[in-house]
Amino acid sequence: MDGVQVKKDAKRITRRVPDPDCQGAGVHDPNQVNEMSDLLERLRGRGWRMTSQRRVVAEVLDGDHVHLTADEVHARAARRLPEISRATVYNTLGELVQLGEVMEVATDGRAKRYDPNAHRPHQHLVCSGCGSIRDVRPAGDPLADLPAEERFGFRVSAVQVTYRGLCPDCA
Amino acid sequence: MDGVQVKKDAKRITRRVPDPDCQGAGVHDPNQVNEMSDLLERLRGRGWRMTSQRRVVAEVLDGDHVHLTADEVHARAARRLPEISRATVYNTLGELVQLGEVMEVATDGRAKRYDPNAHRPHQHLVCSGCGSIRDVRPAGDPLADLPAEERFGFRVSAVQVTYRGLCPDCA
DNA sequence: TTCTTGACTTGGACTCCGTCCATCGTAGGA
DNA sequence: TCCTACGATGGACGGAGTCCAAGTCAAGAA
Ligand SMILES: [Mn+2]
Ligand SMILES: [Mn+2]
Ligand SMILES: [Zn+2]
Ligand SMILES: [Zn+2]
């Protein structure tokens, strides 16, 4: 059961292949491997059927690569699981967002970005030049800055802050 | 020069027609009419060629209708100038944004919204239920909440805050 | 007033991002 | 091992926005 599938119907490859673009070892620190299995454990506990596709998407997001677009996630996932479809990546990302494991970030009118750093709340600093994104933690609670008389009866539940400017390279 | 154009080539209608959906008079207060001509004056001063299309787009935005999408602007403009094209609406909105006369607001992954209230800085409160948007003015300067050591060498120039919650109707 | 011309407008094709759906495959329990 | 409901697939589809070649016209010149 370990041989490469070379049947005449080689369309569906489920086995993972080594990532050709993963230069050098040690890119995963042990801490993150632990977070990884934690995540997979939590998902299994929530009744997820564990497929190779979901595992690979979760692995891609749990690296130190942050703020990827869905298509970037798909590209990285496809290096390990060549037949994974865009639809599945979108489905899985949507489920991870629903479960609160991943944060959806729409900073501009372009593609949404998916942020595995969903458990420690934070805000974003976006470079207007190159589009790069950094996590930041502003002092104080932005929600507290909105006085009751400015809430117009809304039940305010979340606040999203986006700082814009030029990164050192672009300045 | 005042008659209706009914030549055999009636494709291009430049004259404004009365707005069939504009119920009742007095929807424009005199203050806004002044802001209108101010805006047109400023644009003319900046070298704009004053076309009927640009005038109508500016008029639509200068009403008390705020936070319209580009297609909503196009629909309202087309009531007055039936042949106006989507491309021209997009072009004009982009120019108004460049000139700082209109603010582009991307609150979610949907269509951008165009906000004529660009001169008094403010933030937005968005209903997660129905998508309605209200202007709000939080206390304090959100920029000041980002300490220097959290700026990573960025030259931060703007901050956008979006509050999310349920409006009275949706709660 | 008429002429001239380059800025502006048009509509349709195109791209990008994302969703939907019928069909097929398979994880995991019996 | 077998079953089957849940998940994956890929291709069609839709919304939002951009681009372009061709046609039009605002406004200055004469
Ligand atoms: Mn982040
Ligand atoms: Mn506003
Ligand atoms: Zn940059
Ligand atoms: Zn609402």
Image (cartoon, coloured by chain):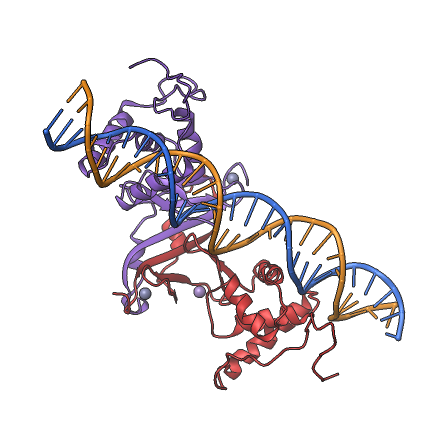
Chain colours: A red, B purple, C orange, D blue
Left or right, A109 with respect to B34, comes to: right
Work out which residue is located at the far bottom of the displayed protein and give it. A25
Quadrant (top left, top right, bottom left, bottom right) of the N terminus of chain B: top left
A86 or B10, which lies in front?
B10
Give percent across and percent down for residue A73: 53, 67
Question: In the drawing, does residue A10 fall left or right of residue B74?
Answer: right
Q: Is residue B170 above or below residue A88?
A: above
Q: Is residue A151 visible?
A: yes
Q: Residue B122: x and y, percent?
A: 33, 45
Q: Is residue B123 visible?
A: no
From the viewer's perspective, is A157 left or right of B36? Answer: right
Give coordinates of residue B92: x percent, y percent.
33, 39
Q: Nearer the viewer, residue A95 or C26?
A: C26
Indicate the position of residue B168 as horizontal and vertical percent values.
51, 38
Look at the picture and state if B169 lies above or below B146. above
Identity of the residue drawn at 53% across and 83% down = A30
Q: Residue at x 53, y 80 (%)?
A: A20
The one nearer the camera, B109 or B145, is B109
The image quarter containing residue A50 is: bottom right
Q: Quadrant of the C terminus of chain B?
A: top right
Q: Residue at x 36, y 60 (%)?
A: A140
**How many numbered marks have been drawn onto this rendered protein structure?**
0
A119, A20: nearer the viewer: A20
> Residue D2's quadrant in the figure?
bottom right
